Amino acid sequence: MVLDISKLSLADLEKGSIIFHYHQKIYKDEKGGLWMASGQGIWLDELAKNFDKLILLNFETPNKGAEQDYLLQSANIQWVNLGYNRGYFDFLRKRKRIKEICAQWSNKADFLLIRGFTPFQNRIWKQLKVNKSKSYLLVRSLKQPRVLSWNNPFSWISYLANKRLEKRFNEILKSVDFLFTNSKEVQASIKKLHNIDAHFATTNVLRGGDFTFDFKSWDANFNLLFVGRIHPLKGVKELIDAFIKLQKRNPSIKLVLNLVGEGEAQFKDELVQKLQDQGMVNQVVFHGRISFGPQLFDLYKAAHGFVLPSYTEGFPRVVWEAALFSTPIIVTDVGGIPAVIENEKHAVLIPPRDSEALYDALHHMINSKHKFEIIAREAFELALNNTVEKGVEVVYKQLQANNGTWNEKN
């Protein structure tokens, strides 16, 4: 059931407690600080403002890696350690641990929210009892394409594990109280396939109050930015092809492409070789993974254009980031993107796997400053309605306005 929550006042709602689970790992420092990926941590700090207590069910990592780039700030967040996740070799012990923790924490919180897909979602969903309602936040498309290779048996293991998770997600749908998704395309698909009303809630982690529109014009230099995995499914090969062609046909403009993200060494080497063959290797910078924060923000601030030519997406958070940094956007019309982003209004949408269409869009961008300033402003205004505050407010209001349905079902 979807209620009109637009006029609901936060002051009129009770707070209560919520248990949250996702598969990202937590690192605990010597002072007791909890570190996790910023894309989840910032969102959780915002969510915690609306509850008396937020209990995290997450696995631990013994070493602080690049992914653990954010220190949780909220004093009302409590971490329940699921132990070390040692992959397939620790499967039985993980199951036992999770069962014991679910028994220990059953009926000690009002709400459960699982962000998924995550490997142990069904076990926690079935075994953990809460006082009011169980909800699920889907942050990916319903079906994920996988690159399969006979030379890589783990690609098949990953494929089969993903299919298993898709099947188990359908089991969760049978008893879910509230379903949230950060993709309007997934929202429509859920309604069509399962006749369930999912609530759209952005998982952007930027705050609208931190930004003002500041378009970056260009003349003889043009900086292009990509943020995502350096992987064929992200359209990086087509991007390199279009970039090479763009520079050759526009010699009066010095182009620079910044690629932010991790990727397989072999694929990167192939891209570097192609750039070397064209004498353009110095115009493309492979930054690797950059944590969410000032260094990444500096690249957004310096970018004249942002491009994401993925083959598939739910709704990528980086689109909101580019928009709030007043950067005109070129993106493929896949997944949940065209349900939110209007072509030629908020961005230029192109088909996936099409380097010619990508080249045309880039060529149009560098030669149409005034038009893309208008497009960037429209995207900025749209992004202001999809900030971290807005997304968390949808989740919190819907939970609180509808509480009690879990007890009715059980």
Image (spheres, rainbow, N blue to C red):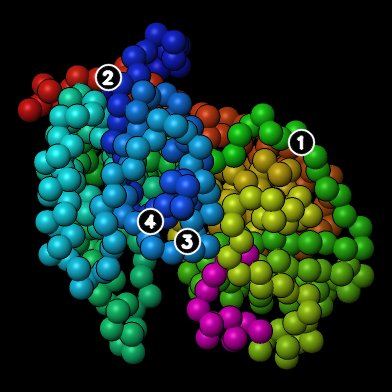
Q: Residue furthest front?
A: 30
The answer to whether residue 270 is magenta is: yes
* Residue 410 image point, x, y percent: 7, 28
Comes first in the chain, label 1 or label 2? 1
Instruction: Write down the residue under mark 4.
Output: 25
Dot in front, 1 or 3: 3
**Residue drawn where x is 67% and y is 55% of the image:** 296
Comes first in the chain, label 2 or label 3? 3
Q: Nearer the viewer, residue 187 or 283?
A: 283
Q: Residue furthest left?
A: 410
Q: Pointers 1 and 3 in contact (CB under 8 A)? A: no
Classify residue 12 by image quadrant: top left
Classify residue 79 by image quadrant: top left
Report the disc number at residue 123.
Answer: none
Name the secondary structure under disc 3.
loop
Classify residue 133 by image quadrant: top left
Image position of 245 with respect to 326: above or below: below
Name the secondary structure under disc 2.
loop
The answer to whether residue 174 is magenta is: no
Q: Amino acid at mark 4?
A: Lys
* Residue 134 image point, x, y percent: 22, 33
Dot in front, 3 or 4: 3
Report the disc number at residue 213.
Answer: 1
Q: Which residue range is magenta in the image?
A: 260-272
Q: Amino acid at mark 3?
A: Lys
Instruction: Write down the residue under mark 3.
Output: 64
Name the secondary structure under disc 1.
loop
The reply to whether residue 362 is in sight is: no
Dot in front, 2 or 4: 4
Instruction: Write down the residue under mark 2.
Output: 402
For residue 310, side relative to residue 192 (left or right): right
